[in-house]
Image (cartoon, grey):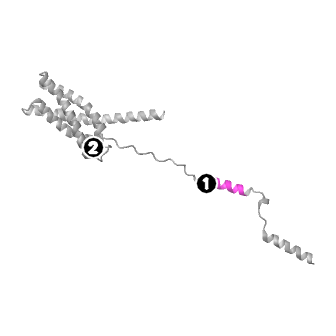
Amino acid sequence: MSASRTALVAKARGLAREIAKFGAVGGLGLLVNLGVFNLLRHTTDLQVVRTSVIATVVAIAFNYVGFRYFAYRDRDKGRRTREMTLFLLFSAVGLVIENGVLYAATYGMGWDSPLQSNVFKFLGIGVATAFRFWSYRTWVFRALPAEPAPATGPAPESAGARVSAAAATAGRRASRPSADRKPDRKTDRGHQGRQKVRSSR
């Protein structure tokens, strides 16, 4: 498998894990959103869209905790003020998208029964979730820069290689001819002295 294909497969797997985590948090947020929406719808006299906006705000707060400490816990944590500002900004855009669908269905089409409100509330959440996924992963919870690869220098010489080199050096020294060795000066001088004594006799 080529390096480019391996990198592509790794990237696809990472994206799949990210989508799974985002979906887990988003699924729980969906239950919170619809639960608060229907609770307020049946216990208060607020209008449908206002009830939906309150439910969306509660779900946004829940989702931030889930995204920050589960789905994107390995992302950059160094700039929390910027992160929170962008999260609120993009969440507000998602809120408009989500409740805009419900508003159009309720006041534009006259579909305001409990079932119809839940259906269009669900559709609005789906459209807004696609926008939130793109904006959160791109701008809010930014990935940390990749760490540089460690420098690869020459491999250290092993102990066995050092022993082999020493043995080879010793073998070369032992195989040198005796003619290359320097004569012993003391032995040479003694031999010359004995010759002088014999000649004097």
Q: Residue furthest top?
A: 109
Q: Residue at x 57, y 52 (%)?
A: 158
Distance, label 1 to label 2, CA atoms, is: 53 Å
Q: Residue at x 79, y 59 (%)?
A: 179
Residue 77: % across, % down: 30, 46
Which image quarter holds the C terminus? bottom right
Looking at this view, is 169 or 87 the one in front? Answer: 87
Looking at this view, is 31 or 18 the one in front? Answer: 18
Res. 98 mark: none
Residue 114: % across, % down: 12, 26
Q: Residue furthest bottom?
A: 201
Side of 44 where 15 appears, left or right: right
* Res 13 quadrant in image: top left
Q: Amino acid under label 2?
A: Tyr
Residue 52 seen in render:
yes
The answer to whether the residues at label 1 and label 2 have Cβ atoms under 8 Å apart is: no
Q: Residue at x 80, y 70 (%)?
A: 187
Q: Residue at x 14, y 32 (%)?
A: 52
Q: Which residues are magenta?
A: 160-173
Read off the residue under disc 1: 162
Give the structural element (helix, strand or loop) at label 1. Answer: helix
Crowding around mark 2 (Cα neighbors within 10 Å: few <14, some 14 to 19, many 20+) is few
Res. 69 mark: 2
Residue 14: % across, % down: 36, 36
Side of 105 where 139 appears, left or right: right
Total marks in image: 2
Residue 115 seen in render:
no
Instruction: Check the image and report above or below for 106 versus 178.
Output: above
Q: Amino acid under label 1?
A: Arg
What's the magenta bit mostly, secondary-structure-wise? helix
Magenta run includes residue 168: yes
Instruction: Check the image and report above or below for 143 versus 166.
Output: above
